Image (tube, rainbow, N blue to C red):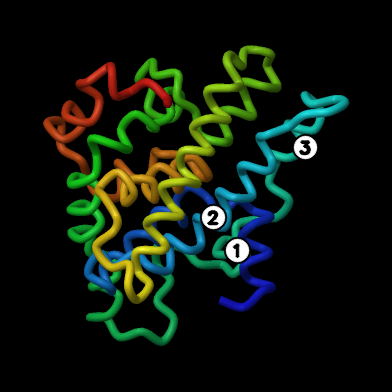
Amino acid sequence: MNPSTRWRLRKAWGFCNRHAWGFLQMEAAFRHGWMHGPAILYLDIMERAWEAINVGGPFPALRLERNLRPKGPCLMCEMGYGPESTGMAKPEVIQRGRDPFELKKFAIHTQPYWRKAVCGKCMNSGSSARCRGHLLEDFRSGSLEDLAAHQAWVRYLVNHLAVYAKSFRHGFHGTESDEDKAALISAVGWCSGWEALFALISFSDSDRALVFSDTELERAV
């Protein structure tokens, strides 16, 4: 990824909700769940998130609000990519990229760890977890509670994404855990929201019950 593209993704907190999960689905589909690129990208973004949310000094509230706002548009939206976009790709390539099987397998396998991160406002679940957008919304409305817990969650994601990203390097294969892998799902959800994940991979009622059944695991770290 060239530096200018990475900088634009940093400024926009990745992609919009639809394109963020579409990007992850495509990566999973074409690379059989080998999430090297997304792991590196979201480690970079979440390191920025840690700097943004770990505010101190004078006027911390003002700085937090400014830090969490996107500073640019979704790159894919700006380029005009939509559900019917095909470019020059062959139909079979398009079909493969739209296959949610690998992403769903990855999500179901790691869900004991990422389900605690699902934003209560995105999914109307009553959880105190928040994505970045709803965290910012709570802050603006004066209803934000326990900022320290949200800061700790971002730090947790950075730590686990660092392990996952490193596991793709020679000599570190197999050092990642399911908890480290789940941090990628959690990071995408934190940056861009959760609605499109559940729509994209068509979780059944039983799948959704599995995700939201354990109230203990719904608590943010």
**Residue situated in front as seen by the camera: 99 or 166:** 166
Residue type (three-letter) at the residue carrying disc 3 = Arg
Residue that appears at 36% across and 84% down: 89
Q: Secondary structure at mark 3?
A: helix
**Residue situated in front as seen by the camera: 204 or 43:** 43
How many C-alpha atoms fall within 10 Å of the one at disc 2: few (<14), some, or many (≥20)?
many
**Disc 2: which residue:** 15
Q: Position of residue 19 (x, y in %)?
A: 46, 57
Whether 195 is drawn above or below 79: the answer is above
Whether 145 is drawn above or below 97: the answer is above
Q: Nearer the viewer, mark 3 or mark 1?
A: 3
Residue type (three-letter) at the residue carrying disc 1 = Leu
Q: Position of residue 154 (x, y in %)?
A: 53, 37
**Residue situated in front as seen by the camera: 22 or 177:** 177
**Residues at marks 2 and 1, CA–CA distance in whole angstroms:** 7 Å
Q: Earlier in the sequence, mark 2 or mark 3?
A: 2
Q: Earlier in the sequence, mark 3 or mark 1?
A: 3
Residue type (three-letter) at the residue carrying disc 2 = Phe
Q: Position of residue 199 (x, y in %)?
A: 30, 44
**Disc 3: which residue:** 66
The quadrant in which the C terminus is found is top left
Whether the residues at callouts 2 and 1 have beta carbons within 8 Å, the answer is: yes
The quadrant in which the N terminus is found is bottom right
Task: State the mark number for residue 75.
Answer: 1
Q: Position of residue 2 (x, y in %)?
A: 62, 78
Q: Earlier in the sequence, mark 2 or mark 1?
A: 2
